[in-house]
């Protein structure tokens, strides 16, 4: 798939100029649409393409032909032409039919918000897993848009001219190829999910608390991970700087450890195809013990970002987990009233600055409290007639060493979660110094 902004080596990227279109349909307000349009401009800027104009259309409902009314579509065409734009981007998800109709009217490339995000993800993907996920999302997006793409081609014919009937259309051939490739990608990603699941089981069996760092894109998630764990995950002041999850271990104030996983950032109206494609990555949030939700405290849209993140977590089924809200970039809050308002609205949030280090100690203490009671190392002596307890020990604990005595008694030293300890108290070897809490 060729991205609309790709050029040959002799053509500068700024040859492409974009005109942005926002639409206001009740109950949305013009203020909300303005914020969305500004975010779209930031997304386009990430692709290094200049924006030469913007327009907002107020509608009662979406038009099935152009999304906007025919009169407004003509107005957009004239404004884009006057601005010198050769790409028009709608801040909504257009249907394939609407996209084709608009391109025929405008005589320039027309894309939607979803395609912009897909292109950013395609550019940012680095690891094999991310490349597979983005490729799958892009193919699923483009499959229904093949109609009309090959309308200039006649039917292919096989064999001697006239000896057989009309061959299949080029579009049918391309559709089949895309479907085959989508099937291949889904199988490859299923293998990735299995490997990730195996790694996750190892962490669970180690009984080490784990948390997933989530939040709006460019809120500082990767920077926070680096600061807390000493990791070297790529971090930059740009949207979707990283797509690949990074898992690292950190030390808590009581010298115990926990695991943090940085996940892909969210954005308003994140394409459903991307949520599905990145499900194995986003599952880190679903299966974590709790969630660290990072917000950009300096953003005027901080509450909207919070709502968007919670919405995506709800779609993933992770909204009921314990959540520690972290307001990052608090060093940029120059107005004391803004900080007071945030603290009033988010009383349980921890305010930090990854740049200055402010609040990091308080955050570590908050994370330790979320981890709850620590597991214990227990030296156990379980008679053979307690087979169910022995089986549960293998399933629910991390066994450090074990052996069977001649009478079938099972002896083991195991790391037992606090919630399971009471069930094994009767099997403790008395006066054994091993039976203590993990440090």
Image (spheres, rainbow, N blue to C red):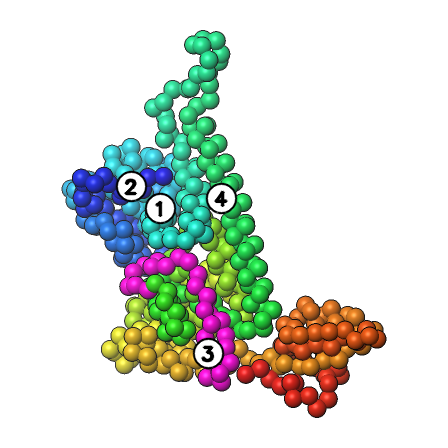
Q: Is residue 217 left or right of residue 196?
A: left
**Horizontal relation, residue 186 to residue 26: left or right:** right
Sequence order check, earlier mark of 1 and 4 = 1
Q: Earlier in the sequence, mark 2 or mark 3?
A: 2
Question: Can you say which quadrant of the picture contains the N terminus?
Answer: top left
Which of disc 2 and disc 4 is earlier in sequence? 2
Residue tagged by mark 2?
A: 4
User: In terms of secondary structure, where does tag 1 sit?
Assistant: helix
Q: Is residue 27 above or below residue 420?
A: above
- In front of the other: label 1 or label 3? 3
Q: State yes or no: residue 257 in magenta.
A: yes
Label 4: which residue?
A: 185
Contact flag, marks 2 and 1 (Cβ < 8 Å): yes
Range covered by the magenta-colored residues: 235-261
Q: Residue furthest bottom?
A: 431
Q: Residue at x 74, y 77 (%)?
A: 411
Numbered circle sitting on residue 380? none
In the rendered view, tell whether residue 274 sits above or below residue 307. Answer: above
Mark 4 closeness class: few <14, some 14–19, many ≥20 residues within 10 Å: some
Q: Are marks 4 and 2 in contact (CB under 8 Å)?
A: no
Question: Disc 1 to disc 3, how far (Cα)?
Answer: 41 Å
Q: Which mark sits nearer the N-terminus, 1 or 3?
A: 1
């Amino acid at each position: 798939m060729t991205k609309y902004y790709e050029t040959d080596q002799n053509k500068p990227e700024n040859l492409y100029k974009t005109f942005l279109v926002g639409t206001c349909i009740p109950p949305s307000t013009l203020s909300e649409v303005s914020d969305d349009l500004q975010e779209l401009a930031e997304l386009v800027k990430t692709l290094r393409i200049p924006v030469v104009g913007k327009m907002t259309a107020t509608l009662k409902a979406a038009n099935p032909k152009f999304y906007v009314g025919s009169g407004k579509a003509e107005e957009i065409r004239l404004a884009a032409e006057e601005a010198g734009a050769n790409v028009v981007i709608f801040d909504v998800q257009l249907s394939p039919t609407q996209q084709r109709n608009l391109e025929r009217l405008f005589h320039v490339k027309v894309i939607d918000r979803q395609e912009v995000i897909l292109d950013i993800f395609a550019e940012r993907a680095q690891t094999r897993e991310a490349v597979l996920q983005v490729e799958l999302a892009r193919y699923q997006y483009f499959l229904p848009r093949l109609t009309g793409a090959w309308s200039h081609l006649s039917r292919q014919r096989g064999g001697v001219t006239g000896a057989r009937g009309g061959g299949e259309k080029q579009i049918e051939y391309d559709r089949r190829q895309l479907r085959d490739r989508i099937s291949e990608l889904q199988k490859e990603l299923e293998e990735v999910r299995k490997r990730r699941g195996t790694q996750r089981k190892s962490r669970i069996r180690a009984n080490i608390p784990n948390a997933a760092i989530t939040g709006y894109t460019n809120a500082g998630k990767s920077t926070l991970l680096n600061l807390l764990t000493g990791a070297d995950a790529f971090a930059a002041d740009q949207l979707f700087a990283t797509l690949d999850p990074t898992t690292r271990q950190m030390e808590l104030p009581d010298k115990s450890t926990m695991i943090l996983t940085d996940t892909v950032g969210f954005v308003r109206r994140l394409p459903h195809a991307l949520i599905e494609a990145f499900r194995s990555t986003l599952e880190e949030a679903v299966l974590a013990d709790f969630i660290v939700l990072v917000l950009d405290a300096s953003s005027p849209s901080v509450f909207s970002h919070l709502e968007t993140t919670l919405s995506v977590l709800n779609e993933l089924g992770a909204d009921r987990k314990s959540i520690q809200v972290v307001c990052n970039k608090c060093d940029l809050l120059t107005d004391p009233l803004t900080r007071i308002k945030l603290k009033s609205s988010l009383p349980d949030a921890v305010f930090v600055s990854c740049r200055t280090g402010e609040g990091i100690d308080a955050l570590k203490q908050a994370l330790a409290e979320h981890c709850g009671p620590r597991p214990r190392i227990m030296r156990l002596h379980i008679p053979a007639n307690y087979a169910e307890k022995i089986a549960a020990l293998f399933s629910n604990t991390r066994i450090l060493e074990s052996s069977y005595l001649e009478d079938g008694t099972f002896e083991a030293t195991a790391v037992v979660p606090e919630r399971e300890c009471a069930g094994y108290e009767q099997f403790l070897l008395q006066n054994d110094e091993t039976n203590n809490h993990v440090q």
